[in-house]
Image: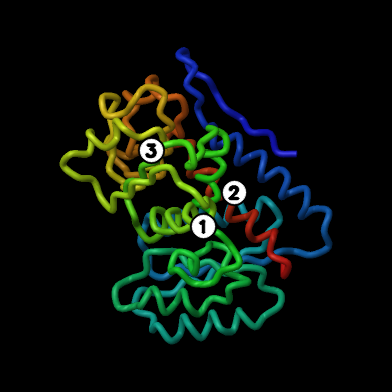
Amino acid sequence: MLRYTYQMNKLDTKIFDGRAIRNQILDELKSKISSSSHVPVLAVFLVGDDPVSTNYVAIKQKIAEKLGIQVRLFHFPEYVSEKEIIDTIIDLNNRPMISGIMVQIPLPKGIDRDNIIRTIDPAKDVDGLRYCLGLESGFLPPVVLAIEKAMAGAGANLETMNTLIIGQGFLVGNPLVRYLHNKYEKVRKLTILSKPVDNLTAITTKADIIISAVGKAGLIGGNMIKAGAILIDAGTSEIGGELKGDIDQSAYDKAAFITPVPGGIGPVTVAMLMQNLLENPIG
């Protein structure tokens, strides 16, 4: 049984230890794979040579292979035709040995992201991209599942708490809002900002739960939250070679619960991708 792991700081703020939770999930998945006669196969599409995308794919591939998952990487040049990608996905949709299909986003200009995503079989959409597009999918996006775990660990409840979501991007904010609306029949107060606004502090100080997915380092400081707030940081940016979150560390000691960057939502997101793949009845 999965045991959630947290750390506590000197002021008893609960810190979501994403690396430890990831390791627990992966250990269970590895045991499941080793006891099965079937080898799961993940097809990964990478288009172009964007260094960030290439790095993300390399991390996912390394973790998958450690678990005993076979990864088939389809690395296309930036000038590849949209038809070639679509034809390849259709072919993989029809291959029973392929357990899941993942397309690394963003795609280069000239390739219609939505057309590519629509092509993925819902039963193999382990990255939940069809869900992000508002389509039928057999899976929730891994980042939404990671945020859900953090919310459960924090005791967050949208039926009793004022909740603020900042950032409504394609991969995080948009599918998260859809998921929360589907999960909760009754929401006390859910405020959604597609982007930061001039009077942001007036809004953040009223929120019991803040979920930020903007990708702007230090967007939310300690003077911008109420004491005892739940802070879930799903925004990441790189400054001077270091990963930074939307929530500044000055807010940590004032909060009841935080997900740090790095080491919070990110590691769990990768683990949930692997869990989606293993939950696929095909694989």
**Up-down relation of residue 267 to residue 255 (above or below):** below
What's the residue at 65%, 61% (across, down)? 277
Local crowd at mark 3 within 10 Å, few (<14), some, or many (≥20)? many
What is the three-letter code of the residue carrying label 1? Asn
What's the residue at 41%, 24% (across, down)? 255
**Marks 2/1: CA–CA distance:** 23 Å
Judged by depth in the image, the label closer to the viewer, 3 or 2, is 3
What's the residue at 51%, 36% (across, down)? 156
For the rendered model, the colour scheme is rainbow
**Up-down relation of residue 170 to residue 152 (above or below):** below
Q: Is residue 278 left or right of residue 75?
A: right
What is the three-letter code of the residue carrying label 2? Ala
Q: Which residue does the numbered mark 2 point to in the structure image?
A: 271
Residue placed most toward the observer, 250 or 23: 250
Assign a secondary structure to mark 2: helix
Q: Is residue 207 left or right of residue 148?
A: left
- Residue 13 in sight in this render: yes
Q: Position of residue 6 (x, y in %)?
A: 57, 27
- Which quadrant of the rendered structure holds the C terminus? bottom right
Judged by depth in the image, the label closer to the viewer, 2 or 1, is 1
Q: Which residue does the numbered mark 3 point to in the structure image?
A: 210
What's the residue at 54%, 79% (across, down)? 89
Assign a secondary structure to mark 3: strand
Assign a secondary structure to mark 1: helix
What is the three-letter code of the residue carrying label 3? Ile
Q: Position of residue 93 (x, y in %)?
A: 61, 79
Q: Earlier in the sequence, mark 3 or mark 1?
A: 1
Q: Which residue does the numbered mark 1 point to in the structure image?
A: 182
- Residue 72 in sight in this render: no
Residue placed most toward the observer, 83 or 177: 177
Q: Is residue 26 left or right of residue 116?
A: right
